[in-house]
């Protein structure tokens, strides 16, 4: 990881209350600091080769170094200490740029001129921001090799800022110490009896049997378990929790890695998707868990009343089986009967939720038997007749920020009075703060003796190297 140079690693082992205590030590070397002045009166702080930033709306944007350690599954009493070795103090003449506010993507926000706004309490404070040199969280989940491990994610803040005093405190190095205790027992069977389990109502069993046979023939040992059997064999506060306890049992008994839920809403026309604040079961073939995450404030913008979101469906609930120490993750950390609550009026927040998936889980939201038969046939045909087996398990995804936080312009060019010939179009954008963007150049040939040829251009990915990006003027069609 860029910025985290391991100068030395050492391990110590000792006995604590019958458990073996492990200690891992390493040294963090912080990359060099760069200060850039902005035309809006602020400065930006960057660390060489570090692309992660602390971005709290209205608070200073500061680089952070993120390091994730992987430990054995079920380790206990994990503690992290980051001790700065050498800290330099700097006086700056301008304030550090505040992070922009997060806005919902609506037709009105596209036309808003959003300027940086300082959190007055933070920018008027004589206390360092952030409060600590580091934070960390611990959770359990699958790593890139589909092995269950304990993740220790350490967020190190090598720059702390006192806005009222115009002071920066920058660490050059730090000692990082990670201590933990090994679990007393093993959590999982050493035997992998099944790789995958399919969960569906009995009404879909016959239609899913060809898929089970197909997976078994492809060396993915697969079991079909009906929801009816799960409800009768497992306990839980509701049907989603019973299914989750079954998945936990399947992991520990058979060491499964993959879970496929087959079943959506029962009606093509109308259904009540939510039975209560926590779940929907009655009108679902396979039930769903709802979060209880509310906007705070309820309507951050005056025009947002139509998009207020009081919780959503999340199948991550079925994949997030364990939390730190290998303990069952209920998503109801305070045991008040309201799952994954945050900012819900009159309800205590559920803090410390794990959110790391412990199985690879997906859902085929089929609404009837015909849809099950159709999707099963498509899966089997696709996997039996790949176009080219060399890319069968590979995928390339292109992604980016398609929203440049500015209003699009639609400038028309009337070519009627122009003579035939070659012309060059230049476009450049400036924002209200005076920041200028790159110049976009396109050469155009006017020739009325031939058919019209239109060209389209989208190359904003070449113009943005940081966030916030510069104001962009791009000629996209001629």
Image (cartoon, rainbow, N blue to C red):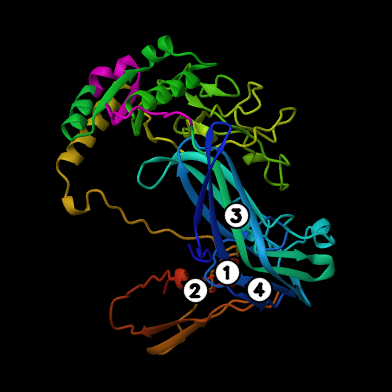
Which is more foreground, mark 3 or mark 4? Answer: 3
The answer to which quarter of the image holds residue 114 is bottom right
Q: Residue at x 50, y 21 (%)?
A: 241
Vertical placement of residue 226 versus 434, above or below: above
Cα distance in 3D space between marks 3 and 2: 29 Å
Magenta span: 184-208
- Residues at circles 2 and 1 in contact by the CB criterion of under 8 Å: yes
| Residue 257 part of the magenta segment | no
Residue 272 percent across, percent down from the top left:
51, 21
Residue tagged 1: 469
The answer to which quarter of the image holds residue 428 is bottom right
Which is more foreground, mark 1 or mark 4? Answer: 1
Toward the viewer: 303 or 244? 244
Residue tagged 3: 155
Toward the viewer: 324 or 219? 324
Residue tagged 4: 431
Which is more foreground, mark 1 or mark 3? Answer: 3
């Amino acid at each position: 990881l860029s910025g985290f140079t391991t100068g030395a690693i050492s391990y110590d082992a000792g006995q604590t209350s019958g458990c073996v205590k492990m200690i891992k030590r390493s040294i963090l070397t912080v990359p060099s600091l760069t200060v850039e002045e902005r035309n809006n009166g602020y400065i930006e702080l960057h660390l060489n080769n570090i692309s992660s930033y602390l971005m709290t709306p209205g608070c200073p944007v500061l680089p952070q170094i993120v390091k994730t350690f992987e430990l054995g599954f079920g380790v206990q009493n994990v503690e992290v200490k980051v001790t700065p070795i050498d800290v330099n103090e700097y006086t700056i003449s301008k304030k550090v740029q505040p992070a922009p506010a997060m806005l919902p993507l609506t037709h009105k926000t596209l036309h808003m001129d959003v300027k940086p706004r300082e959190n007055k309490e933070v920018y008027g404070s004589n206390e360092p921001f952030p409060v600590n040199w580091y934070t960390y969280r611990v959770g359990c989940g699958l790593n890139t090799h589909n092995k269950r491990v304990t993740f220790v994610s350490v967020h190190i803040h090598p720059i702390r800022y006192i806005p009222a005093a115009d002071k920066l405190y920058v660490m050059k190095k730090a000692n990082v110490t990670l201590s933990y205790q090994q679990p007393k027992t093993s959590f999982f069977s050493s035997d992998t009896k099944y790789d995958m389990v399919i969960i569906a109502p009995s009404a879909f069993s016959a239609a899913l049997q060809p898929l089970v046979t197909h997976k078994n023939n492809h060396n993915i040992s697969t079991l079909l378990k009906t929801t009816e059997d799960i409800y009768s064999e497992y306990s839980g506060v509701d049907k989603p929790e019973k299914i989750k306890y079954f998945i936990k049992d399947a992991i520990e008994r058979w060491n499964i890695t993959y879970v496929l839920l087959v079943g959506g809403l029962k009606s093509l026309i109308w259904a009540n998707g939510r039975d209560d604040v926590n779940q929907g079961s009655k009108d679902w073939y396979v039930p769903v868990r709802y979060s209880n995450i509310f906007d705070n404030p309820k309507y951050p913008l005056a025009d947002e009343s139509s998009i207020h979101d009081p919780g959503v469906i999340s199948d991550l609930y079925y994949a997030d089986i364990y939390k730190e120490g290998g303990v069952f993750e209920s998503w109801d950390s305070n045991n008040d009967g309201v799952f994954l609550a945050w900012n819900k009026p009159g309800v205590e927040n559920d803090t410390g939720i794990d959110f790391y998936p412990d199985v690879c889980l997906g859902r085929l939201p089929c609404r009837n038997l015909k849809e099950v038969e159709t999707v099963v046939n498509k899966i089997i045909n696709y996997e039996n007749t790949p176009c080219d087996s060399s890319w069968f398990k590979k995928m390339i995804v292109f992604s980016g920020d398609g929203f440049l936080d500015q209003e699009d312009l639609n400038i028309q060019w009337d070519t009627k009075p122009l003579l035939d010939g070659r012309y060059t179009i230049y476009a450049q954008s400036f924002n209200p703060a005076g920041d200028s963007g790159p110049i976009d150049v396109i050469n155009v040939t006017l020739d009325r003796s031939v058919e019209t040829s239109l060209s389209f251009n989208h190359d904003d990915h070449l113009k943005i190297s940081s966030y916030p990006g510069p104001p962009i003027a791009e000629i996209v069609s001629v």
